[in-house]
Image (cartoon, grey):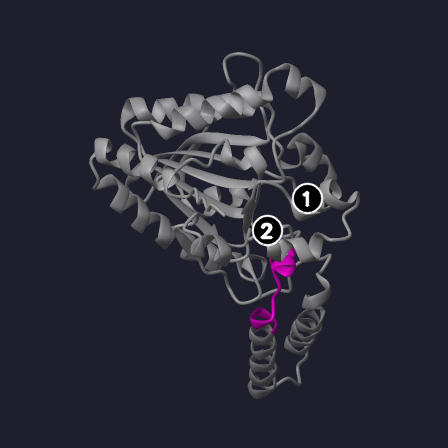
Amino acid sequence: MPVPKGPHLEFEQPVVELAMKIEDLLKSSEVTGSDVKGLQAKKDALQRKIAARLTPWNRIELARRAGRPFTLDYIQNIFTDFVELHGDRRFSDDPAMITGLARLGEQSVVIVGQQKGRDTKESIRRNFGMAHPEGYRKALRVMKMAEKFGLPVISFIDTPGAYPGLGAEERGQGEAIAVNLMEMSVLRAPILAVVIGEGASGGALGIGVADRLLMLENAWYGVISPESCSAILWGDSSKKQELSGTMKITADDLKALKVADRIVPEPLGGAHWDPEAMYETLRAALVEEIAALRGTKLDLLIADRAAKYAAMAQFSEK
C-alpha cells in the first residue's frame, strides 16, 4: 500500500521511512520478493510495537491526522445511491454538515455527518468541520424524514466542536443543538452513531444521541478538547498531553465507561494507512448493527435509548 501523505506524526516517522524504502525497492529492477517481504514484515512489526505504546495523546493526534478518511469518503466507499440533501428550510445550507439518503446493501438509510476539508480552500468552505445552527437544523430535518419513512439514521461524528462565532450564536447555536438532543432522544427511528475522528463538545453530541455508539479505534469523544481544558485550568495548553489521559476520552476509556458500545478496529498504523480496509471493516460493523436495531420494536428501542443515557451518570457521596 502507498505511504500516506504527510505531514507525518513524529512517532510514525520510523515506519514512514521503512515504507518509503519498500516503495523505492519496488521500483528497482534488481529487487527480489524476499527483500520486499522481509522489509514488509519489519515494517509491520514496528507498527505493532508503536501501536502497543500509543498514549491517549498519540490517539488524539491520529484522530486529527491529515489523510484520515472523512465522512464523504465513508459515504462514497460504503454506501450506494447517495443523494445529498441541502438546506435547513429556515436560513441556508451548511457545507460542514452532510445529510442525505443512501443504501447500505439493500437497506435504505438516512445519513448525517460532519465534513472537514482536505486543503485550505475546502477547509474554509466546510468551516473545518464546525457546523452552524443551520447545519444542526438540516440534520434534524432529514432525521425527521427518516422517522416519517421508517428509515434508520447513521451519523458520522468528526468535529472539533460546533462553530462558536457571533453569527452562529445570533442564529441560536445552543438552541439548535439542544433541540436535536431532545428530538433524537425520542426519534422513532433506529439511530447508529460512529465517531470516525474527533468528537468534541455539543458539536458532536448534536448528532450523537443514538441507540448504538461506535468509535473507531483511534477516535476520541469528549465534552472539550485537552488543549481547551488546559487553557481553562492553567491559562495555556501546556498540560494537554497529561489531560488527554485524565479526561478518559479515547475509545478504550469510553468503552470501559459504557459510553461507547463498540470499538471498530483500524488497520495497522491507523485508518490513513489502509483506507480500503477501513471501509470494509466499518461496512461490516454497520450492516451488523443496523440489522440488530431493525429487529427491535420502536417502543422498546426508545425506552432502551433513554435507559442507556440515564445509566451513564455516576454519583458518589462523601
Coordinates of residue 156 in the picture (x, y in percent):
48, 40
Rendered residue at 50%/56% (across/down):
253
What's the mark number on residue 247?
Answer: 2
Q: Nearer the viewer, residue 72 or 146?
A: 146
Spatial distance from mark 2 to mark 1, Cα to Cα?
9 Å
Residue 54 in sight from this viewpoint: yes
Coordinates of residue 166 in the picture (x, y in percent):
71, 20
Q: Amino acid at mark 1?
A: Cys
Residue 127, quarter of the rendered image: top right
Q: Is residue 167 left or right of residue 309?
A: right
Q: Nearer the viewer, residue 276 or 150?
A: 150
Whether the residues at callouts 2 and 1 have beta carbons within 8 Å, the answer is: yes
Question: Which stretch is magenta?
Answer: 50-61
Residue 163 lies within the magenta run:
no
What's the mark number on residue 143?
Answer: none
User: Could you tell me which secondary element the residue under label 2 belongs to?
Assistant: loop
Q: Which residue in the rendered view is the most extreme toward the front?
A: 318
Pointer 1: what residue? Answer: 229
Q: Residue 276, relative to residue 29: is it above or below?
A: above
